[in-house]
Amino acid sequence: MKTVVGVGKLFFWCSFICVLFLAWTPFVSADEVEDWMIESRLDRYYDLPKTARVVGMGGASWVTSNDISSVFGNPAGLGFATGPELGITYSHDEYSGRDSSFAPFIGGNTGNTKAAGNPIFCNAEGRKNQGGLQLVLPGGAGGSCGVFGFGAWVDDTNFDDCDDTDAQRYRFNAGYGLKLNDCLSLGYSLTYFNDDVEDRYSDYNLDDGFRHDIGLQLRPGPGCTFGLRTFYAHGNPDTDITTLGSDEGDLDSWGVEFGYSWQVLPCTLLAASVDYQDREYDGIIYAPDQDEIRSFDEEIKGWGFHVGLEQNYRDCLFPRLGYRYQTNDYDSHQVGQYFRGRDDFESNYHAVSTGIGWAYNKCLTLDYGMEYRFIGDGDLNNTVTARFHF
């Protein structure tokens, strides 16, 4: 038994060294302005929060988990939940990069000779504080009638960018998972989104955002789990431009995620997953350089590759490691009275993560997860979760 545990420790730390090596290898990326353009927009596209355990494993375990992570994750994992559970999570995220804007145009926009001036560049930073609750409730004795999941989440984001952007977002979730047999579980969840984003020129409001998740988990053996999740999200945000009017847009997103977790050794869990997301917005944007509203559409396509490890020390401590590689392909068009513009570029980056779980007793587990993203000046996420088992 000691030999097996020793091999598990060796496997864990060798994998840690490999993750660090991957993180420091060269990679292709856009410049800091383009990176910021994408990172500051992604939160609008119906993204869901992660628990500290998922963060610590690089997101790799999200689609195969069967605990409170399944509330905002793969709803099929609810079907394999072992009992009632309440989770409380807090997360702090830091962003960095360079933002660009234009000086406001002085005077009426009446001539066809007005051209865009030189852009203004500034160092940009962002801070996002978020937190919420996740609740897992089996229906019937031992979940014989399926398992229900409920979640509530709020985040407050402040950007020190060229336009002084602030955002408040609320998410409310309800899901259901049903274990059809010992090997198969299916699930569905619905999440409601309410967003308010303000800057010095406009007020963006979304009060009818909905995301539908459908999931599947397959467990062909006691030590392995396959997970599959797909989603579609939609809404009609309203953008109000100061003094010039407002208009309603279309905000849609869809994606798919596939993952696998494997108990490679008695005390070592390996998880890996890949996901794809397509995000689209069709609405309006304000152009301060010519003091006009322009029609605007953008699309962000992204692939994510995740791998994570979790080591079990005496069913008490659970150190974790993770690695993530993210690609984003950005394309946007804007059309004004005398202007046509397009942005088309890619932004790719590495991220490494670590964390630890502590099973204080049978009723309480404390988790911590940290992710460092090699983008901007180095972006950092810290997440803590308290899980209460009943």
Image (cartoon, grey):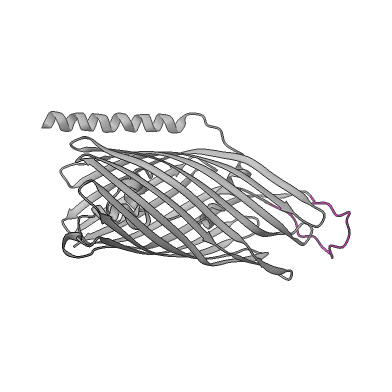
Magenta residues, start to end:
101-117
Where's the C terminus, which quadrant? bottom left
Q: Is residue 274 left or right of residue 113?
A: left
Q: Which quadrant would residue 335 be assigned to in this image? A: bottom right
In the rendered image, the vertical position of residue 191 relative to residue 11, given as above or below: below
In the rendered image, the vertical position of residue 380 relative to residue 26, given as above or below: below
Residue 97 visible to the viewer: no
Farthest-out residue, front: 180
Q: Is residue 55 left or right of residue 117?
A: left
Q: What percent of the width, then of the height, locates residue 365?
A: 23, 55
Magenta stretch: dominant secondary structure? loop
In the rendered image, the vertical position of residue 48 relative to residue 26, given as above or below: below
Where's the N terminus, which quadrant? top left
Q: For the point 89% across and 59% down, which residue is it?
A: 111
Q: For the point 24% across and 52% down, which residue is it?
A: 180
Q: What percent of the width, then of the height, locates residue 375?
A: 52, 41
Q: What percent of the width, then of the height, locates residue 252?
A: 55, 56
Q: For the point 60% across and 55% down, which residue is it?
A: 281
Q: Is residue 119 left or right of residue 227?
A: right
Q: Which quadrant would residue 108 be assigned to in this image? A: bottom right
Q: For the point 65% across and 42% down, which residue is it?
A: 344
Q: Nearer the viewer, residue 168 or 44?
A: 44
Q: Nearer the viewer, residue 323 or 77?
A: 77
In the rendered image, the vertical position of residue 184 relative to residue 24, given as above or below: below
Q: Nearer the viewer, residue 283 or 159?
A: 283
